[in-house]
Image: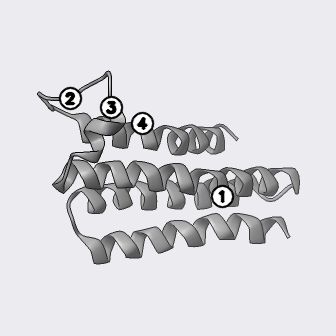
């Protein structure tokens, strides 16, 4: 159960990690207008911001799947394994997005989506 909770925490923190990547070593970062500053960015900073937005979008599907799997008494080992696949896919997704590797990014995005959907199927 601790591993499952850990994956929920990690997934919830991934958008913050992406924001940190986007702002990393930015000498002109404007904390008074962070969204306006981000809209002016391009290249890897803009991709890190897009990964942040996608991470926020992916979290509810994952979290609800985890909770449904837990309340239906699915084997916690199977839930944890599926959760770690999701986390690994999301971390790779962020890396490939920031690195501008679109095909690999899409592939690991799909793996993460399948892992999240698997949680719902386990609950059926």
Left/right placement of residue 35 relative to residue 99 reads right
Q: Which residue is mark 1?
A: 61
Q: Which residue is mark 3?
A: 34
Disc 3, disc 4: CB below 8 Å?
no
Helix, strand or loop at label 4? It is helix
The residue at 73%/53% (across/down) is 64
Which of the marked residues, 3 or 4, is nearer the chain's N terminus? 4
- The span from disc 3 to disc 4 (Cα, nearest Å) is 14 Å
76 up-or-down from 123: above or below = above
- The span from disc 1 to disc 2 (Cα, nearest Å) is 32 Å
Percent from the top left, x then y, of residue 124? 85, 70
How dense is the environment of label 1, judged by Cα within 10 Å: few (below 14), some, or many (20 and up)?
Answer: some
Disc 2, disc 3: CB below 8 Å?
yes
On residue 29, the disc is: 2
On residue 48, the disc is: none
Q: Nearer the viewer, mark 3 or mark 1?
A: 3
Judge whether residue 21 can be spotted in this image: no
- The span from disc 2 to disc 4 (Cα, nearest Å) is 16 Å
- The span from disc 3 to disc 1 (Cα, nearest Å) is 27 Å
Observer-nearest residue: 26 or 77? 26
The residue at 67%/50% (across/down) is 63
- The span from disc 2 to disc 3 (Cα, nearest Å) is 7 Å
Left/right placement of residue 73 relative to residue 85 reads right
Helix, strand or loop at label 2? It is loop
Q: Residue furthest top?
A: 32
Observer-nearest residue: 28 or 89? 28
Which of the marked residues, 2 or 3, is nearer the chain's N terminus? 2
């Amino acid at each position: 159960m601790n591993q499952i909770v850990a994956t929920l925490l990690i997934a919830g923190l991934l958008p913050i990690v992406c924001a940190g990547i986007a702002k990393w070593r930015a000498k002109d970062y404007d904390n008074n207008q962070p969204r306006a500053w981000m809209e002016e960015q391009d290249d890897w900073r803009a991709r890190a911001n897009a990964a942040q937005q996608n991470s926020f979008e992916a979290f509810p599907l994952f979290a609800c799947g985890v909770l449904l799997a837990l309340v239906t008494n699915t084997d916690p080992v199977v839930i944890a394994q599926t959760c770690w696949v999701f986390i690994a896919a999301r971390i790779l997704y962020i890396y490939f997005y920031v690195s501008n590797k679109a095909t690999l990014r899409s592939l690991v995005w799909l793996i993460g989506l399948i892992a999240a959907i698997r949680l719902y199927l386990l609950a059926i």
